[in-house]
Image (tube, helix red, strand yellow):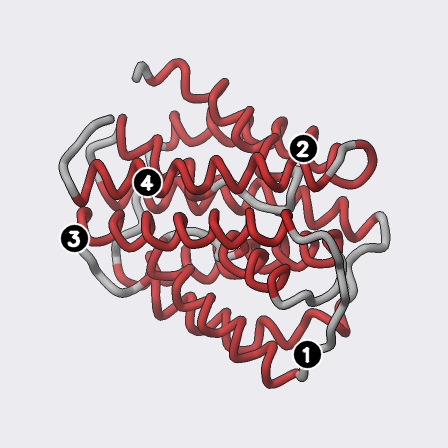
Amino acid sequence: MPLEYLPLLFFFIALFYSSVGFGGGSSYLAILSLVLADFYEIRSTALVLNICVVSISTLVFARNGVLKPRMLWPFFVLSIPLAYLGAQIKLSQDIFFIILGVALILAGIFMCLRYLQSNLISSEFTNSRKALLGGSIGLLSGISGIGGGIFLSPVLHLLRWKDGRIIASLASVFILVNSIAGLAGLQMAGTFKIDTNLLLKLVLAVVLGGIFGSYLSSKKFNLKVLGILTAVLIFYVGLRLILKFGLDLNI
C-alpha cells in the first residue's frame, strides 16, 4: 500500500471509530504493519494517533455533559499503572499481533452480542469491581499497544452498565489515559520510535476524522448501526492479524 494513501484511509478510520467512542488504534496497527518495517515505530505511531482522536471525543462528551467523573474515576485507579507496565513488556512482532488479533476477535463478537440485545437494563458496579475490570483491561491495553476502550466497552455493554453514551464517554477517556501511560512505558523501555514527517500527516488526518466522528456520535447518527458496523470491522481486523501473523496467510 503506497504511503500517500494513508492519510485519507486514516481519516475514515478515525471518523468511524470516534463515532462510537474509540480511537482506531487496532486498525492503525494492522494497516501500519503492512507499510512500516519497524515494529516499535508501528506501536508508537498508533498510540500517538489514538491520543489525538480520543482527545477530541473526550472534549465533545464533556461539552455535552455526558462525562460523569464521579462515576468513572475508579476504572482508572489500576488501569493507568498496569498499562504503563504492560507497554514495557517486550514481545516478538508475531506474538504481539496474534495476541492483538485474538483480543479483537473476542471484542468484535462481544460488541455484536451487545447491540443485538433488545432490552437495556442499567446495573450498578462497586468501585472495587470497576477498579479490577479497569486494571485487567489496562494491562491488556499496554501489552497490545492500544488504549483498551475497544475491550472495555463491549464488556460493559454485556454487563449492562449504564447507557451507551456514558459507556462511549468512558471508553474515550479510558483510551486517552491508557494510551498516554502506554507511551510513557514505551519511552521508559527505550522502544518509542516515530517518523515525524509521516506522523504529522497522519495526525492531521485523524484529527479531522475524529472531529466529524465525534459530532456524529454526540448529535446525529444511530449508535446501534454504528456499533454493529464497528464490531464487524473490529472482528475483520482481528481475523486478518491472526491469518497473517499466526498462519502466514495474506488473504
2 and 1 marks in contact (CB < 8 Å): no
Task: Tell me which amino acid carries mark 1.
Answer: Phe
Please state which of residues 5 and 228 is positioned toward the viewer in this rendering. 228
The residue lying at 74 percent from left, 33 percent from top is 216
Task: Tell me which amino acid carries mark 3.
Answer: Ser
Q: Residue furthest front?
A: 118
Residue 81 vs 213, above or below: the answer is below
Residue 51 vs 68, above or below: the answer is above
Q: Which residue is label 4 attached to?
A: 239
Q: Which residue is label 2 attached to?
A: 213
Label 3: how many residues lie within 10 Å, few (<14), some (14-19) or many (20+)? few
Quadrant of res 243: top left
- Residue depth check, mark 1 versus mark 3: number of the one nearer the observer: 1
- Residue depth check, mark 4 versus mark 3: number of the one nearer the observer: 4
How far is mark 3 from mark 2, CA to CA?
34 Å
Query: Looking at the rendered structure, which numbered label has been put on residue 92?
Result: 3
Task: Tell me which amino acid carries mark 4.
Answer: Leu
